[in-house]
Each structure stands twice: as C-alpha cells, then as structure tokens.
Image (cartoon, rainbow, N blue to C red):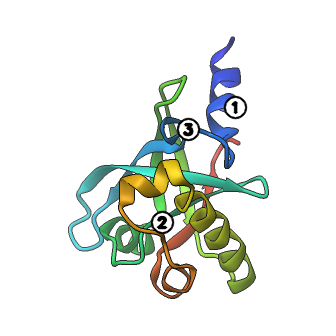
C-alpha cells in the first residue's frame, strides 16, 4: 500500500468507522495570539465531504479557525500524514444534514456510553460549531 492509498483509506471514514478512525489532530493558529495550537478531535465524512464539529459549547478550535481558516490536519489512523486544509463555513441545509448525521453517530450505544447521556439534536443545531474541511491536495 502506498502513502496515497493509506491517506485515501484514512479519509474514507463513515458512520460505521471506529472512534480511532474518526480521531485526528489539528493544528490551528490561536485567534488572538497566532500561536499554533494542536488538539485531538473527531472528524466526520458526510456525503463525501469532511467536517469538524463538537459538543454544543464554545470551542477554542472553532474561534481559531474563524480567525485563521488555514490549518493542518494530522492523520493518525493507518497513516501518519500532515495535510494542509482550509475551514469553510457551511450553509443551513448542510448544517442540518451534517449535525443530524453526527448526532445519530453520537447516540449509538457504544459511543453514548462514553458521553453519559444522549445528545439532543436541537442543542447541537443551535450551539455546535461546524466547518467543512477543504484539503489542499484531495
């Protein structure tokens, strides 16, 4: 398997992918400081596009991406790769489709047990950050 094949496989996640397959790191630039910040986060693929979202609370990574949309995705499952990308805003119909898919995933028993409660779609729609990941080379 070549690196390109491994990258394609790591990006080909779906609702049946494991938590590990959804897990990446991202490096953003601090919204106020401009200092690089690296965190671990899940990414999602819905309708062939990639997204970052999170629980319905304010997130520093989201503030960072709003201020500095260029960032690095660090793949960790099956391949180690650092991929430059841009965070793009999404429209409301896309937001509804993606958040619905993510909440459905979050409410699966094997994942919901880790969070300790079912996720509420209305809370996620109203308060969760969401950006599309547009990779430079994919």
Residue indicated by mark 3: 18
Q: Distance between the residues labelled 3 and 1?
A: 16 Å
Residue 36 relative to residue 44: left or right: left
Q: In this view, does 29 lie above or below 93?
A: above
Please identify the quarter of the rendering in which residue 122 is found. Answer: bottom right
Q: Can you tell which of label 3 and label 1 is closer to the viewer?
A: 3
Residue at the right extreme? 47
Return the disc, 3 or 1, that comes first in the chain's sequence.
1
Q: Quadrant of the N terminus?
A: top right
Check residue 130 in the rendering and tell me which mark sits there, or answer none. none
Asked which secondary structure carries label 3, the reply is loop
Label 1: few (<14), some or many (≥20) within 10 Å? few
Residue at the spot x=72%, y=73% of the render? 97
Residue 49 relative to residue 104: left or right: right
Residue at the spot x=27%, y=65% of the render? 30
Q: In this view, does 12 lie above or below 121?
A: above
Residue at the top extreme? 1
Q: How far apart are marks 1 and 2 (CA)?
A: 23 Å
Check residue 69 in the rendering and tell me which mark sits there, or answer none. 2
Label 3: few (<14), some or many (≥20) within 10 Å? few
Residue at the spot x=68%, y=29% of the render? 9
Q: How far apart are marks 2 and 3 (CA)?
A: 27 Å
Please identify the quarter of the rendering in which residue 134 is found. Answer: bottom right
Q: Which of 16 and 31 is in front in this view?
A: 16
Q: In this view, does 86 lie above or below 119?
A: above
Residue 15 relative to residue 82: left or right: right
Residue at the spot x=27%, y=54% of the render? 37
Residue indicated by mark 1: 8
Q: Which of 51 and 105 is in front in this view?
A: 105
Return the disc, 1 or 2, that comes first in the chain's sequence.
1
Q: Do the residues labelled 1 and 2 touch (CB within 8 Å)?
A: no
Q: In which quarter of the image is the C terminus?
A: top right
């Amino acid at each position: 398997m070549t690196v390109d094949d491994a990258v394609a496989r790591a990006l080909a996640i779906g609702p049946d992918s494991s938590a590990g397959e959804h897990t990446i790191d991202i490096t953003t630039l601090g919204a106020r400081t401009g200092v690089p910040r690296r965190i671990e986060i899940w990414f999602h693929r819905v309708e062939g596009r990639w997204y970052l979202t999170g629980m319905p609370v304010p997130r520093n990574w989201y503030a960072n991406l709003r201020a500095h949309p260029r960032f690095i995705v660090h793949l960790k499952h099956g391949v180690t790769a650092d991929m430059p990308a841009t965070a793009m805003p999404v429209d409301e119909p896309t937001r509804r489709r993606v958040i619905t898919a993510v909440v459905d995933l979050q409410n699966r028993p094997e994942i919901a047990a880790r969070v300790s409660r079912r996720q509420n779609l209305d809370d996620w729609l109203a308060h969760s950050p969401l950006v599309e990941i547009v990779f430079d080379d994919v």
